[in-house]
Amino acid sequence: MNERLAHEPAKGAVAIHHPQLLDLYTPGPAMPVDPYGERQLVVWVPDAYGRMVPMPKHLAPAPLLAPEPRDLTPLPLLDPIAQRFMGAGLGGGALAAGVGYGVGEIVSAAAGISGGALVWAAVIVLALRAPARAISGGKGSTVNIRKAVIKRNRFYS
């Protein structure tokens, strides 16, 4: 026999083993056993990874209700309410552009009055006040009245 594998007796104090009581391992009261006919139903549900796992039916999540069928009739290309809003926006924009253009024309006309139109108005007023002879080239109905006063002075008389 090899000396390394030989068992040598303990050289120190020997520990005495005190075994534990076996009361902990005695069978307790009998567990109730479900007979085969009284077992709860088991359903298969998908887990987080897509695998199907068994689960008691009373613990399973509620089944998903089928959604109501959708109305698949084709809708108009543009919503009628959106068409109204778009029409109101275009009409309002055209109205604003027209009003702006009109106000601009009025303002520019008022600015032009000070320069050219007032001069023309003055020419018209002067022409209306001028004698008819000047306007018609001397063929008017103007009557000239001359009053001649003859006074004779006599010197040394």
Image (spheres, grey):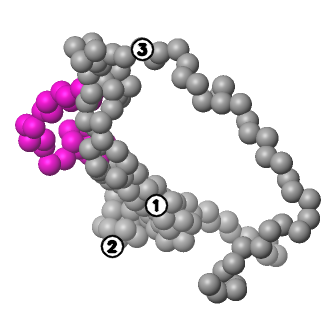
Report how far apart the C-alphas of labels 3 and 2 lie in the structure: 142 Å
Q: Residue at x 72, y 73 (%)?
A: 7
Q: Is residue 87 magenta?
A: yes
Q: Residue furthest left?
A: 73
Classify 102 as above or below 73. Answer: below
Lower sequence index among marks 3 and 2:
3
Which of pointers 3 and 1 indicates the residue nearer the eye?
3
Considering the image in quadrants, where does the N terminus appear? bottom right
Q: Which mark is residue 134?
A: none
Seen at 42% across and 14% down, the residue is 32
Residue at mark 3: 32
Identify residue type, mark 1.
Gly
Image disc number at residue 104: 1
Residue in front for this viewpoint, 33 or 128: 33
- Taking depth in this image into account, of 57 and 102 the one nearest to the observer is 57
The x, y position of residue 84, in whole percent, is 26, 40
> Which numbered disc flags the more N-terminal residue, 3 or 1?
3
Residue 144, percent from left and from top: 45, 61
In the picture, the quarter occupied by the C terminus is bottom right
**Neighbourhood count class around disc 1 (C-alpha, 10 Å): few under 14, some 14–19, many 20 upward:** few
Circle 3: is it few (<14), some (14-19), or many (20+) Cα within 10 Å? few
Mark 2 or mark 1, earlier in chain: 1
- Tags 3 and 1 in contact by the CB under 8 Å rule? no
**Circle 2: element type:** loop
Range covered by the magenta-colored residues: 62-88
Residue topped by disc 2: 137
